[in-house]
Image (cartoon, helix red, strand yellow):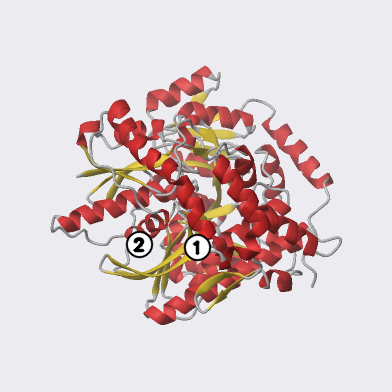
Amino acid sequence: MLVLGIADGQTSGACVVESGKILSAVNEERIVRMKQARGFPWKSIEEALRLAGADCSDVSAVAPSDLRMGLRETVTAWPGWFEARAEDQDRISKLFFRGASRLSSVFPYVPGLRAAYYGLRTPRFVHRRRRIGQILADEFQIHAPVRFCHHHFAHAASAYHTSGFEEALVVTMDGGGDGHCSHVYSVRAGRFKRLATTVSYDSLGNYYAYVTALCGYKAKRHEGKITGLAAHGHPAYKELFDALIGCEDGRLVNRGRVLFNGALDYIRSSLPPGWSHENLASTIQLVAEDVVTSFVSHWLEITGHRNVALAGGVFANVRINEEILRLPGVDNIFVHPGMGDEGLFVGAALAMSHEIAGREGHTIEAGNLPDVFLGTDLEEAECENALSAAGLKFVRPAHMASHIADLLQSGHVVARATGRMEYGPRALGNRSIMYRPDDPSVNDWLNELLRRTEFMPFAPASLEEASDKLYLEATGGLDTARFMTTTFHCTPWMREIAGGVVHLDETARPQIVRKEENPEFYAIIEEYEKRSGIPAIINTSFNVHEEPIVRTAGDAVRAFLDGKLDYIQLGPFVAKGPPGAAEARRKATERRSQRKPVPASPA
């Protein structure tokens, strides 16, 4: 029985699930080439069905995520949270946003305001539910029953059903969805028992978004920059933020009673003269770690669980995830690879698939996610045509892994696009840019070439067998680290020899690579270790800034040339970049070296 999962909100996409197994999953952004594409996933539905080898008539049920949302039939790029609010054509939403910004302090005492808001918007919700069924029938000839899934239950289902845990504490946390910012579940043998919900008014994710905006970035789009920037400062404003957001008896509490633009104004006016972005980032990072670990600790004590499964945008914060792993009583954590809204359609489909199996008297055994290579494949002819069209000369190495390892050891940057594209926000070897990990300067010149303003170092892809040599206290997080969803503190040896991937706080965000999951990528790292003694390479996503990760061979060649990189592996072929790549790197290094450095944290 095939279930089609779809999401048409902030980050849209589609997947096909059969008896609890994900056959395909793709986000709309990769196809339409717009970062965080939002709206109805027209092309993702077609692609997900094609990749699953399914026909529209094979679909037995459709599971869209989100209950309380209007329909956006035209796909557009997500511009950022405050920018999206300014563009919103829904008059009721605009009025609520403005009113909530001004009257947020009275919200807890006038619960009817929230109910009135959703009551006024109910016609839009009803229209969407009807219209999606019409679109599926009229445009795709899908006549299967459609059942909408709550935003946070979709997150929870995605986390639990891909974790491999038989029993677990499941926690979701984000800025907000369907009126909530968090759900807590105790799950045993696939049975979900909801223990707590938190309304969006008390959202920790929103406070992280406010800081993102105050630092000059786009809220609910660039929070990862704040996570990286945090290590460059110190938590000078912790007292202020402790008074704004906290955890009390297992509840998230908006102590500041501020929202939206009102929150921005209040925080800005409360900061001391001359406040710094670095210290503000450090503050919200520490406060977020404290709040989340207190929250999770409370529910661990209540339930007695020792496994924790996580999803929701807050858990895109890899440092928070490591702190959860280090909590007393936690044996294992798992963070769903598409932890943000990009994974909602997978969660909705998994939830429905398991529900249908239960109704029919079947049991789907718990199992971990084998891999996330669930997207578009690259055909050999497509790769050859794309290279030829760009005028690139290419070879077909007899021993690809050795050939790539030689290039990396020689100091070249190698882009790699081969096999099926990864699902989720991380590139995990099939749409990646690779480089040696022992060059600390790489963060300057490669970010410059890719037009990125990142403060996190590049991530290492490392052999699973070398984990103890590279990382500290990583055992319970190795499975989730296959998807680059947590940091680990690094061993002294790792800190000494891999300066290109170790952050100022002595952590790295690794991809643990298993031979059985991606043997060709594993072989490249293995061959590189033979040459260098280092069982890891740099792996960063194959895209330039503000563009989605590449999907097709044509996307890959364009990004390769745009980034002025040295070599590209495209399917079974390897091509050298045009003359000028080395000079572009030299100039990028010079430009970066002339910029004012980010100040280090005071002792």
Question: Splitting the image into 4 quarters, where does residue 598 fall?
Answer: bottom right
Q: Earlier in the sequence, mark 1 or mark 2?
A: 2
Residue at left 59%, top 63%?
107
Residue at left 55%, top 20%?
390
Q: Secondary structure at mark 1?
A: strand
Q: Which residue is mark 1?
A: 199
Residue type, label 1: Val
When the figure is inspected, residue 93 is found, relative to residue 57, above or below; the finding is below
Q: Nearer the viewer, residue 239 or 547?
A: 239
Residue 383 position, x and y percent, is: 44, 26
Q: Secondary structure at mark 2?
A: helix
Crowd rating for badge 2 (residues with CA inside 10 Å; few <14, some 14–19, many 20+): many
Residue 254 position, x and y percent, is: 60, 67
When the figure is inspected, residue 46 is found, relative to residue 482, above or below; the finding is above
Q: Nearer the viewer, residue 367 or 9?
A: 9
Give the spatial CA distance, label 1 vs label 2. Answer: 22 Å
Residue 133 position, x and y percent, is: 31, 36
Considering every residue shown, the one lying at the far left of the view is 361
Residue type, label 2: Tyr
When the figure is inspected, residue 40 is found, relative to residue 168, above or below; the finding is above
Q: Is residue 462 left or right of residue 561?
A: left
Residue at left 54%, top 51%?
531
Residue 537 position, x and y percent, is: 55, 51
Specify the quadrant that holds the C terminus. bottom right
Crowd rating for badge 1 (residues with CA inside 10 Å; few <14, some 14–19, many 20+): some
Q: Which residue is mark 2?
A: 160
